[in-house]
């Protein structure tokens, strides 16, 4: 089925060409957002809901519309693993140049395409300098050992790879995260839904090592109720869930972590329109001791973290979020 040529964004419900609708549905089905039986060329609530879910996970704007950017993202959509799906089984590390199975090479190349390390035209099942260099860059950015080799951990990391995201707000940092059980009830105070009166230097939840001040930039970014991102109550609950996940990262890392970006109310024109920061489900973090690899390892060791942004020392942060999806995804900047 040919990839549609869409030059101007249009709501999916307004698309009248059945082949275009079928293509969108088939791509969504490949990512397990729809069932194969739903690929019928007819736009209904199920197809619109699937498109919305996909675009929210990918932080794409206008969740019920398709445009050139959405078509490109759908074209790169990797099917979610199911029984019988090909994923290379590698029990012992091997240099990529020594891999002779064309299907394995194609799989690696297609995953590198997802992260914009290669172009689609480079997926040919042949190992050349371009593919080796792409794998090297991917592994160096993710602090993975043996940059030109494939092993079980590299296969897992490649399988999580999704399209790159945009960097925003990293020039501004807030106080380094505190230590202790609950933090002092000092600084400015605000009354918030769900939790009542809280203080700037108070931990969001005990032992979380992140304060209300850090999450809200000194209460300058209070929870905002919107139909798109949820009620104030939901935002506060998301803050608490994010804080719990961060506390686990901090415990595993064992050293102070600076928060470079936390909650971003949707009225701020910062970052992607569907950013997880706007749900209060995301943090951008920086190791104060400079150990970026150790912090990345700690982030990946916490199961609740489903989105990992690979930025690293070049950009000065890692992104972590608790988006509500089953499989973890990683992406670059």
Image: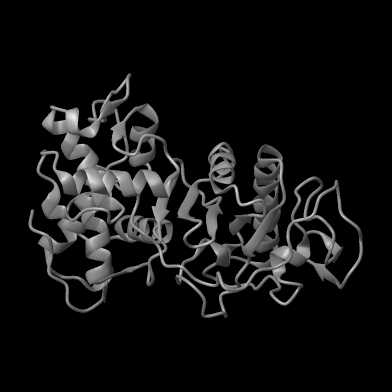
Q: Quadrant of the C terminus?
A: bottom left
> In the depicted view, which residue is nearer to us: 39 or 31?
31
Q: From what the image shows, is residue 64 above or below residue 331?
A: below
Residue shown at 10% from the left, 39% from the top = 126
Q: Is residue 256 above or below residue 221?
A: above
Q: Give me the residue at 68% from left, 70% from top.
A: 223
* Corner quadrant of residue 201: bottom right
Colour mapping used in the image = one colour
Q: Quadrant of residue 145?
A: top left
Residue in the foreground of this view, choosing between 114 and 52: 114
Q: Residue furthest right?
A: 185
Q: Residue at x 56, y 50 (%)?
A: 322
Q: Where's residue 121, x and y in %?
A: 11, 54
Give percent across and percent down for residue 185: 92, 61
How far from the left and from the top, in percent, is residue 312?
49, 55
Count of numbered marks: 0
Q: Residue 253 vs residue 185: left or right? A: left
Residue 278 visible somewhere in the drawing: yes
Q: Determine if residue 37 is in view.
A: no
Left or right position of 264 against 133: right
Q: Position of residue 267 (x, y in %)?
A: 57, 80
* Residue situated in front as seen by the camera: 269 or 101: 101
Q: Is residue 195 above or below residue 81?
A: below
Residue for point 55% across, 71% down: 227
User: Compared to 96, does 26 lie above or below?
Assistant: below
């Amino acid at each position: 089925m040919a990839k549609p040529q869409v030059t101007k964004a249009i709501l999916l419900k307004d698309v009248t060409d059945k082949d275009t609708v079928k293509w969108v549905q088939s791509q969504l089905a490949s990512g397990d957002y729809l069932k194969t039986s739903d690929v019928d060329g007819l736009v209904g609530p199920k197809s619109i809901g699937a498109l919305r879910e996909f675009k929210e996970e990918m932080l794409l704007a206008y969740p019920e519309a398709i445009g050139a950017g959405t078509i490109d993202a759908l074209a790169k959509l990797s099917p979610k693993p199911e029984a019988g799906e090909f994923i290379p089984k590698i029990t012992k590390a091997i240099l990529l140049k020594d891999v002779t199975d064309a299907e394995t090479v194609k799989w690696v190349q297609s995953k590198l395409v997802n992260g914009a390390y290669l172009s689609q035209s480079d997926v040919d099942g042949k190992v050349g300098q371009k593919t080796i260099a792409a794998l090297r860059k991917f592994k160096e950015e993710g602090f993975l050992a043996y940059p030109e080799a494939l092993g079980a951990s590299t296969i897992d990391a490649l399988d999580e790879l999704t399209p790159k995201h945009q960097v925003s707000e990293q020039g501004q940092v807030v106080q380094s995260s505190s230590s202790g059980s609950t933090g002092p009830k000092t600084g400015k105070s605000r009354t918030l839904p769900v939790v009542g009166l809280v203080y700037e230097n108070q931990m969001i939840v005990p032992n979380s090592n992140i304060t209300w001040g850090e999450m809200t930039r000194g209460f300058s970014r209070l929870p905002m109720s919107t139909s798109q991102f949820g009620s104030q109550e939901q935002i506060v609950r998301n803050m608490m869930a994010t804080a719990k996940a961060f506390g686990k990262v901090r415990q595993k890392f064992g050293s102070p972590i600076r928060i470079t970006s936390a909650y971003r109310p949707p009225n701020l024109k910062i970052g992607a329109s569907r950013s997880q920061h706007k749900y209060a489900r995301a943090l951008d973090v920086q190791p104060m001791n400079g150990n970026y690899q150790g912090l990345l390892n700690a982030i990946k060791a916490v199961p609740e973290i489903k989105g990992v942004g690979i930025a690293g020392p070049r950009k000065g942060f890692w992104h972590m979020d608790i988006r509500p999806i089953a499989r973890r995804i990683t992406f670059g900047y």
